Amino acid sequence: MIEEQAVVVGIEHDTALLEIVRNKPCGLCGQTRGCGVSVLGRLLGHRSAIVRAENQINAKTGDTVVVGLDEKALLTGSLAAYGVPLFSLLIGAALGASFATTRASADMYALAGAVAGLALGLLWLRAHSARRASGRYRPVVLRPATLNSELRFCKQGNVE
């Protein structure tokens, strides 16, 4: 189980809205919230994303908690999100090129096949992620954070 500390910023039924707070600042920019290196991070003001997690401990808004995600779920989700569209793009390009009648038209057929393969892979991913929106692929609030970790966040200036 991968664990990280977060602050509860809201509650919706049995779901906690969490803002993940990194223990260590980013090695590139020194930010502990949001991205300070990317163009989007600079444009959006280093805002953190809000994560939804099952609230099994009935945490309240403002609580500092430990949230966890199963490693296998993270690995399979990453493979689905990155691997399937890439694989379908490559298969589509190969199939498209195989339909070409002349060597000069092979690139156009490969391009059309790659676009079609990528589109099919993204459609599959959308359907796959809709089915997996709950269950083991969702993060879970595991327990309240310990007092020592809360003090560390306060010293860093991350908790208000």
Image (cartoon, rainbow, N blue to C red):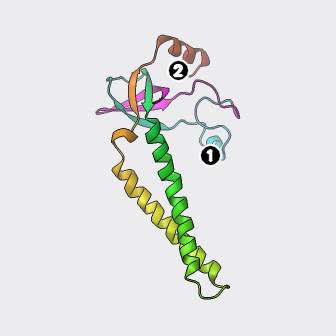
Residue 3 appears at what percent x and percent y? 48, 28
Residue 120 appears at what percent x and percent y? 45, 66
- From the viewer's side, name the closer residue of 16 and 62: 16
Residue 36 appears at what percent x and percent y? 66, 37
Extreme residue toward the bottom, this view: 101
Extreme residue toward the right, this view: 28
Question: What is the span of residues highlighted in magenta in the rendered image?
Answer: 1-29
Graded by Cα atoms within 10 Å as few (under 14), some (14 to 19) or many (20 or more), the crowding at tag 1 reads few
Q: Which residue is mark 1?
A: 40
Residue 159 - label: 2
Amino acid beneath label 1 = Leu
Label 1, label 2: how far apart the Cα atoms are: 24 Å
Whether the magenta-drawn stretch holds residue 28 is answered as: yes
Whether the magenta-drawn stretch holds residue 23 is answered as: yes
Question: Left or right of 44: which side holds 1?
Answer: left
The residue under the point 43% across, 62% down is 123
The residue under the point 55% across, 77% down is 96
The residue under the point 55% across, 82% down is 99
**Image vertical order of residue 152 relative to residue 89, above or below:** above
Q: Secondary structure at mark 2?
A: loop
- Mark 1 or mark 2: name the one nearer the start of the chain: 1
Residue 58 appears at what percent x and percent y? 31, 23
Q: Secondary structure at mark 1?
A: helix
